Image: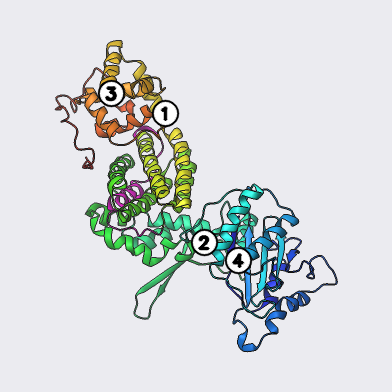
Amino acid sequence: MIPRIQKRGKRTIGLLYYLYGPGQFEEHIDPHLVASWDDSAPDPGRDPNATLKQLQHLLDQPVENVDKAEQPKKHVWHLSVRNGADDRILTDEEWGDIARRMVAAAGIDDPEEESGCRWAAVRHADDHIHIVATLVREDGYKPDLDFDAARVQAEARELEVELGLRRLNKGDGTAAKRPTSAERHKAERQGRERTAREELRETVRRAVAGAASEAEFFGRLSAAGLLVRQRVAPSGDLLGYTVALPDDHNKDGEPVFYPGSKLAPDLSLPRIRERWSTSAAGHSRDTATDRTSGSARISPSSARRRATTAIWQAMVVLDQGTDGQIAAQIAAAGEVLDALAKTSAAHTRRELRDAAWAFERASRSHVRAERGHDRALRQAARDLIYGGPVLGRGEDGATTAMVIDMVAFLVIAAAHWHGRKNHAQQAAAAREAAEHLRAAYQSAAQHPMAVLRHRGRRLSQPLQHRQVAHLRRAVPELAEQILAEPGWHALAATLADVEAAGHEPATLLAEAVARRELDTAESVSDVLVWRLRRLADLPADASAVPEPGTTTPQRAGRPKRPSPRDNNRPRRAR
């Protein structure tokens, strides 16, 4: 249940005309009263003899009874209360009770007193009501509305429990502005999956992912097909921007433009500039200069490998960094997800897009991000964008599974951090994103893991026994669990590849396990496969690796890997 106090107004009749009218797009159906201050107010929606002027006069009467100097400049209070799309449809009686409790919680009226403000609750849709009140009490005093928004939110949480509705998490003012009911109805009529505001927010977020300058950002917006207007001061300084979809028009046939700040708090131009001012200097020449002109020098698989390294470094910060550093890493993780969604193959595109969409809420909180600490992740997002889209086969497909597996751990770590900070909405959003990432991983990993499992089953018996011995020696506490998993054969094949590449399997396996907890992993063997292949610099696509027992000129004679480094030190990208 979402209660929202709107801006106060000066004209009661104007609001009543809107509430009882057809709406901007004919979305108001059967408007009528469900409750009022004395339950006997005239209802122009159901009573043919009642008029809007009569209802307005009764609501405004206490205001008109006091001296002009005592009247509030804006005396109209307006609260909308909306249920979620999955909630059951409430009856008029239930909505009436909700209205009475909301005005009591806000301080508009008190059922135990007879001197509250006058109010009326209008229902013109299944899922919400509007409450209009005038801000002079019957006794001539003004109501105490301090913290009215917080009080109606608290009342909504109690009503959700009592009425069996979806329980929402407490907000903190950092969420993106929700589309209005008119925007939603317009999207439905146009056959859009999302409203224009939501489509623009997603497109702008993808355009800013890894961007290093204003020119690059605005170039990406134009390339994405958006209409862009820049707000320029008389001095020539750029102050802000607005964007519109080319096919979204108002009643006059003009494009509907939205400022970046109305799409999301972190999409205003000043907030976007914070990313550039501290990270642009960290971009190398080939990524900052050549790529902005469209010349990419990195393959999609290399971009994904680099991203896994950056994510590992970010995990260390989430474990040991300050709150500001952690907030920066989480915000940059949103850019990585946006970049992955933009460049994903068809079979993972939907889940990655939904993961990025959900995690958008987790990327903002009241903890101020210390920009600059997010340079590696922002560079990873940039690499992904300029590495280009993947086909989902071969090394590209396998490295996609690798990076999705890695970013899922980062998202889960973000959920844990938000949970410790009591950021309820952000923690829930991160958990939702993790579910979509798990589904995306299953799609991406299906073929490369099948290849690895097949190769693992073909290992000779002595070689299989040797890998079991490595496993028991390196992680005795997890060995039996891993051996019982379907992915064990894929891990055995990877251990054989590690050994053939000149590494000590047990040593590298112990390092892979120590790098991060495995309690949240659905398949420990899957996680270890990708960690080992990254640490040993093996191709993610096992079909590109010779069968165990053979060597290649590139691998032959390679020295064994030294002992593990300190687990808390991020590994330099290869």
Q: Earlier in the sequence, mark 4 or mark 3?
A: 4
Q: Nearer the viewer, mark 2 or mark 4?
A: 4
Q: Is residue 547 visible?
A: no
Q: Residue furthest front?
A: 112
Q: Earlier in the sequence, mark 1 or mark 4?
A: 4
Q: Nearer the viewer, mark 1 or mark 4?
A: 4
The secondary structure type at the circle numbered 4 is: helix
Which of the labelled discs sits on residue 177, or is there none? 2
Q: CA distance from mark 2 to mark 1?
A: 40 Å
Q: CA distance from mark 1 to mark 4?
A: 57 Å
Q: Amino acid at mark 4?
A: Ala
Which image quadrant is residue 503 in? top left
The secondary structure type at the circle numbered 1 is: helix
Q: Is residue 312 visible?
A: yes
Residue visible at 56% across and 67% down? Answer: 148
Q: Give x and y (percent) for residue 350.
A: 49, 43
Q: Nearer the viewer, mark 4 or mark 3?
A: 4
Mark 1, residue position: 447
Residue visible at 41% across and 22% down? Answer: 485
Image height of 342 relative to 185, above or below: above
The range drawn in magenta is 366-395
- Taking depth in this image into account, of 21 and 128 the one nearest to the observer is 128
Circle 2 packing at 10 Å, graded few (<14), some (14-19), many (20+), is some
Q: Amino acid at mark 3?
A: Leu
Q: CA distance from mark 3 to mark 1?
A: 19 Å
Which of the labelled discs sits on residue 495, or is there none? 3
Q: Earlier in the sequence, mark 2 or mark 1?
A: 2
